[in-house]
Amino acid sequence: MSEKKTTLSRREFLKDAGLVVGGATIGSAAILSACSGKTTTVTETTTKNSTVTETKSVTGASKFICPVDSKEFSSLADLQSHYAAAHVDKALENVVTLTVNGNNYTLAVEPWWPLVYVLRDVLGFYSVKVGCDLGNCGTCTILVDGTPKFACLMLACECQGHEIVTMEALSNGAVLSPVEQAFYDHDAYQCGYCTPGLVMAAEALIKKNPKPTAADVQYAFSGHLCFCANMTKQVECLVGGVD
Amino acid sequence: MPYDAAKAKEFDKKTIKRSVVDNPAVHDKSGKWIMTGRAEFAADHFTGHKYFGVAKLATVMHAKIKSVDFSEALKIPGVIDVVTVDEVPTWSDHVLWYGKEVAGVIADNWYTAIRATEAIKVEYDVLPAMFDPDVAIAEDGKDGTANVGLIDGTNLHQRTAVVRGGGAAEGFKNVDWDFTFEYPWTTSYAHNELEAHQSIGWWIGDEAYLYTGTQDPYSTRTSVAPQFGLPAHKCHVYSRFNCGGFGGKTDDWGSYAALAMSKKVGGYPVLFKNTRYSNVLTRQRSFSIKSKIRLGGTKDGKITALDAVFYANEGANTAAPVGDCIFGLQKTWNIPHADIKCIGVLTNAPKRYYWRDVADPPGGYNTESALEKCAYKLGMNPLDFRLKNVNPCDVQPPAAEGGWYGAHPWGSFVIKELLEATAEWSDYRKKFHLPATKKVKDIYPNEFKEYADWYHGIALTAHLDSHGGSFAAARGGMLKANADGTFQVITGSARGTAGGTTVCCTTVAEVLGARDEDVLLGDWANTDTGLNPGVQASSSHTISISSAFYNAAMEMKYKMTVMALNNAAMKKVGATKDDLEFANSTVYFHKGKADEVAIPFASLGLGTNTAASAGGADGTGSSVQNDLQKLLGQRAGGAWKSKFNEKGEEYIKKGDKVLANGQSGACLELAIDPETGVTEFLNYFLVVDTGCTMFKQGALREIGAATELIHSQGYYFGDVYDEETGADISTIYTEAQFPTYMDMDFSTHHFADYQSEDASGTFGCHGIAEPSLTNFCTVALATFNAIGVWVDCHKGGFTPDRVLEALDRGIGADYKALMEA
Ligand code: FES
Ligand code: FES
């Protein structure tokens, strides 16, 4: 029996579009070498203001193939030098500088990488959580130029030149921000998974409207879900403002 | 110094000078991590140094995998490797439901892995499938090949059977009335926590490591280790935070795959993670039941005979916890002769697991519906009928009397009090009427004008929570002293909700006389350093884990006393152990003002001390556990009192078997527009017994959350499957279209904290709100009271279309038929 194809997700669509528009999407993020069913991968991690290439041989590949022109090399180092020399344009194609919590991070991203993936799994801002990855729950909310946005619905490559703020920037862990303190004092969380998204939305609200009514808060939280069913407290703790 | 319980107890002479109940200074100890974005959930590790694993899921209900073609998937840039069902423990080539894992991909990012699963081609030998549980029952045994494929030749197996007195046969010999009620399959819901399941597995040499989203890291270790041929100490599990305040994260679903995938790539960390949709297909969906309940009794409304059969749809899970659905009927109602059975029905549907509130919502729905209709038939007020038949208190009759309570004694049993309290608060007696006889304006001439001509309905129920009876692991607590006079509580408990870890800290602070802020959370939820706290240490099991910490703190206090008496200043004043006072993180001697000596804990030299203790298995009634209950009873305002049963016998005395539980009562008043089928809540009163809960803020918060969940359970949850393929197509789950309180008029929800004087109540807070959830049956009962037609929660909620469908039979039609039958 053959399989039913399930629907194409928005992200898959974008990825496919990227393949068509940009030609090879290899960029500089992943160089794959496929040889007789065995694979070897070079992954790249990015640190602040620079890119560092790290290799990890996984299943013992015997040769290394350039994904852009299919030339073969016997070592990863050879492939890397070839890639850097011959495809420098490609390497630079997807490099962006993201400004997160006031710091600049220059890194290579695939055109279809969601911002939430880059913030979490490339840069390590783990306060940003993923709930639905579909724009339904608000868990991944961050501030982009002061406006709450769902990081799962933004592409990292769109974010150059914008100020991104995550929950990590709100306090140093010892002294809570007034919004965080209000949540804490009202026990406006249970498991805490939805909390960062709500707190970021609340930060934006309070900045714009320091004395919100219940209706104002409800409106600000209308794209958010708390599966611990804790939204009464989450709204209540902000009504009338925070000190 | 060995622990000497007798000696240690001598030190427990301190008056409790403060109450933690309602003390706003006692805060959720792990809350600061959450409030600063530093709470580490399972996936929040190994930045840039991990691969991503995703499972490909079956698109058929019942089949054997014939072949799997990975070739296209392997060509996708970023794919590292693939795994077959043979490489992951718990996966198999026998597909039993739509959504079972049939292959896996490891890639350098999650989105590539998802994409690669789409490129895998699977061929199946499709087998006959059984999705509809009624067909599974009807066809059972007729054709050996048509069964679900889990038990040879059958789809049915008995899960529970309870006989009381002479059983139904004896009971029905002599009754004045004899009624039978049948209910079709109830709906179910998915736990569906916001954090889709995620686990990171990695290997160092031959030792396995896991960050995983589970409430129960200990059970994960004991179930995962043998699957990889490891002794338990070579499997290390960490689960500090996990999502889902009302439970639902007790399975190890992703752990096996994460470790197997990591093994495949040489031990490098692999984050195995679900998409929202695959989370719905692979994670917990609660079971549904249908029932036939026959009741008989005497003219005055006493039920004397019961014959009840519950069928439970277990999906493809022979171990689904469906047997618990009889608890409400078994424990709450005092019926001398009874047969109660639960029969599991296997189907090719996803595996079924617990409900929130463990087992009671579908059982409670069926039971309460039968009781309500029975009361109407007898011409009794449903409240009076319940009060007549409810167990008066939790007297545990001897086995010779039939062992009615079986192996599950209940420590707190104030259902009768809750029925009365809820009735009083809601003014139920004044507002009650027969079905389809009152409009809103008849009850509220001056209020709710917009619903004046809608039908008014009212119903009142009360339930206990099954928490506490289902698990029987010993609990352990470990306490470590630091040189600076602070202490670390090491629980081995994951944080799924607030309260559990906090009450452990509070218990220690109270026993030691330490400041709250000096008792910290140590390396909790780490199987390497903590002791086994049980499945849900933040649940009603908190009493067990707290008693372990009580014990450990007593040992620590004993050590500290010896150290204090060896202190030069204490020696100088000739202090004895009876002269010492522990308070404010200081040991005091103050016989006379002039002789006062104060030694801060930080000066005792405690740095290398640890204390550990096992709390005893559930229900063992250890003296330490009972001492703790007594201590907590005092905290709650000196409320510890012996309780007496109808015969004047004391219950819950030292040495008794007790378990912590929760219970609640609810009264719903609603209005229904007969033209549109629209229902509006007028008032929803929820009364919850929080007993001597230490983390009261958390308890109140959870009760508020429960009212939201009851509302959404009544109207939004539903089983929506494509019956041809078995695919879940409910957007509530698949697209996280979950209602929140913003979808409801929350001003109609009222909740009260009924703090019973029973010191064996719940001590954390997780278990407190859950018993409220069974009260979603009030929606069915109040709807019947309003319009006199029965709307079942079969496949969905009490939505306007379903109300209108029932109204096609005419206002009051089902009530009339009931009374004439
Ligand atoms: S994860 Fe972004 S909205 Fe749900
Ligand atoms: S606090 Fe758990 S999801 Fe909101």
Image: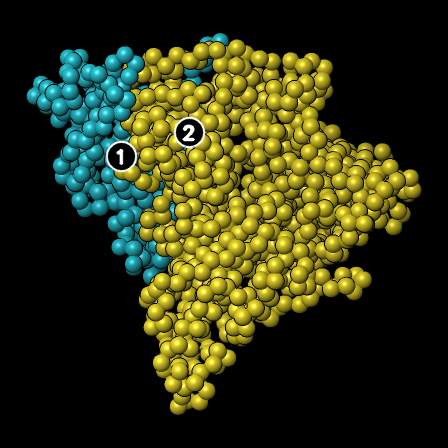
The structure residue drawn at horizontal position 54% and vertical position 22%, both measured from the top left corner, is: B97
Q: For the residue carrying disc 1, how many other residues have a C-alpha within 10 Å: few (<14), some (14-19), or many (20+)? A: some
Say which amino acid is labelled 2. Ala
Q: From where the camera sits, is residue B249 visible?
A: no
**Residue B750 in which image quadrant:** bottom right
Chain bearing mark 2: B
- The image position of residue B145, as x and y in percent, is 64, 13
Give the chain ID for the yellow colour.
B
Q: Who comes first in sequence, dot 1 or dot 2? A: 1
The residue closer to the viewer here, A165 or B31, is B31
- The residue carrying mark 2 is B257
Q: Is residue B235 above or below residue B538?
A: above
**Visual hue assigned to chain A:** cyan
- The image position of residue B418, as x and y in percent, is 68, 56
- Distance, label 1 to label 2, CA atoms, is 18 Å
Numbered disc 1: secondary structure: loop
Give the left or right position of residue A111, taking residue B299 as reference: left
- The residue carrying mark 1 is B49
- The image position of residue B702, as x and y in percent, is 52, 51
Quarter of the image that includes the C terminus of chain B: top right
Quarter of the image that includes the N terminus of chain B: bottom left
Give the left or right position of residue B403, taking residue A13 as reference: right
The residue closer to the viewer here, B444 or B464, is B464
The structure residue drawn at horizontal position 92% and vertical position 42%, both measured from the top left corner, is: B174
